[in-house]
Amino acid sequence: MDQRESALDEAWQSSEELIEKISKYHAYYQRRIKELDELATQIGIHTVDEVRNEIENVKNQLRSIQDSIRDLDMSIASLSQAGPGGVAGIQALAASKQLLASQAQIIAQKLNELEALLQLIIKYAALLAATKLEVQAKGSEIGQFQQTIEPVLRLAKQRNDEIRTKLSEINQSSVSGTQGGTSGVYEVFQNVPVMGDEYFYRYQTAIASITSLFTAFQEVVNTVYLYTSDNTSKANLANNAYFSESSEFHKQQSVLEKTRMDKNEATSANKRQQKNKIQAILDQAKQSIGSCSLLSTINTDNELYSRVQGDAGQTAGEKGLYQKYREANAQDTTIGSEIAYDLEKPEPVSFKAMGMLEAFNNAAESMRNELYVNEFALTKFNYRTFGLEKDPAGQPKLSNELVNPGSHKLANQEVEYLLYGFSSCGANISSAYAEMFAFRMAIRTVEALLDPKKELFGIGSPLLVLLAAAAEGALEAFQDMNKLTKGEAVELSAKITTSALSLTYKDYLRIFLLLHSNNTKLMARMQALIELDTGKDLVQETTYIQGNGSSEVRLWFIPQIMKLLDGTGLLGCKVQGNRCQFSSTSAVAY
């Protein structure tokens, strides 16, 4: 759902940018077409060459008149020297000169007009060429928007189809009861928004239509060279066509997108609220993990861990006890820690918590000889609540071991080290706390899901329903942890078990030993702790084990005859009554 909504958000953002550009282009080309039309009206049917030729002719005429005027001026100057007899001639020449001057003025005015017309033609030609180039560039931009929007819409539709398929599977499971469909929480899936194919079809068609209509406008602009009344009308119609399509699309689609995004924002705000609730509990839980300084001496622990795990600055040839026994067991000696569990972010913690229940179910189906090794670890070594747990009479539980685990050098942290393998008490204890918190949170979350907040169903966000349940589960889990770390038992669940079952901190360590089954590392760590506590090098110690077994079979032949054969050793068994007993002994030393 998040991927679909993210893709739709991206598509709409690009669509709004496209619509904004379309609006600007439309207004811009409205002005440009009007300008070209006005220039074309002023120019008429004249061409550049025609006007230039006419300008040249007019210039020649003007030069001829100017030459004539100069000739008249020379003649007038000659007559003026002739005395009174030349006055009449001078007057006649002056009149001719005045007539030529008037003609020259008219021709100069015509020359100015022709030159202005030439400038208009040049401006028109330049504007026409620029418009054709601009429209081509704008068409490429519009096409690029289409290439951006369509793949994102296809992705959104693909995710929408997947949502529809998953909802169909969930509904079928709900009906058949195979997925716990009887729970009311499944009602939330009925309200998950699924868009019809028509939504994507209209969206993609509108974008393609806008692009196509702009291309049509581009073709009109490319074919028009003179903006006559008909061509101007044709260009304006093409310019309005893509703008009208864009405006109509925006008018309809913006309503759908606003409704969708407003709902998403409301859902996101609700999710943030639930996450904040979870985060507040996680912050409290981190403060309640506890300090190892209360369990043992930090400096002493550091020295002991250095002996057990080895030191980062150790020289070649030096090994910690863990490395030593990994090598003795013919295993990789590289120091490595198990996965650390943290309580940092609410959503990952919630998902990890729910995943733990599935992991526990899978592990419970394949219990093998790990159980023996795990029980050895819990019996022979101490842990955080060792000495705090009480028996049914309310008295502290006592250890029945020959050597009390409470007297070991690493106090109240050994099983945690066996589990997680970190080189500090704090890391091991906090990992145990975080994993235990997550396990309790998972159970409490399932309980909350069995009695969900129905007012959240209508929002159609399964994740929101889960987060709301996780917020309740986190609070309950935090309260559970306060009891568990004090050595008290906490009921597993009153809602998801047929009978009340209470577990202690130690019981959860038992579960985690099963979940994180890794006998080779666990064995090496136990061997390292044994040497740390006893000072005995187990590599040099001899261990012996012997097993005895017997079985019986019924004698099919006459028992008396079998007894006779018993002393011969032919039967391989000892006859007792009508049965034959086989015995076997096996021993191994290492």
Image (tube, rainbow, N blue to C red):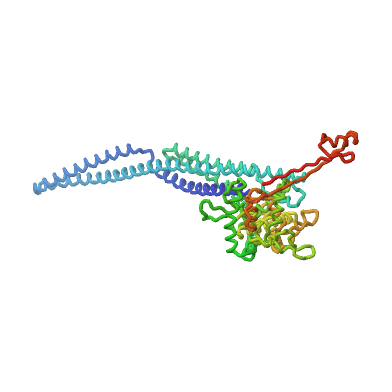
* Res 455 visible: no
How many marks on residues?
A: 0
* Res 112 visible: yes
Task: Give percent across and percent down for residue 418.
Answer: 65, 54
Q: Compared with residue 449, is residue 161 higher up or lower down, i.e. above or below?
A: above
Which residue is at the front of the view, 67 or 357?
357
| Residue 89 shown left or right of residue 495 in the figure | left
Which residue is at the front of the view, 480 or 388?
388
Task: Give percent across and percent down for residue 55.
Answer: 29, 40
Furthest residue toward left: 82
| Residue 358 shown left or right of residue 210 in the figure | right
| Residue 323 shown left or right of residue 477 in the figure | left
Task: Give percent across and percent down for residue 286.
Answer: 63, 61
Q: What is the quadrant of residue 482 in the picture? A: bottom right
Which residue is at the front of the view, 96 or 45?
45
Which residue is at the front of the view, 271 or 394?
394
Task: Give percent across and percent down for residue 539.
Answer: 62, 50
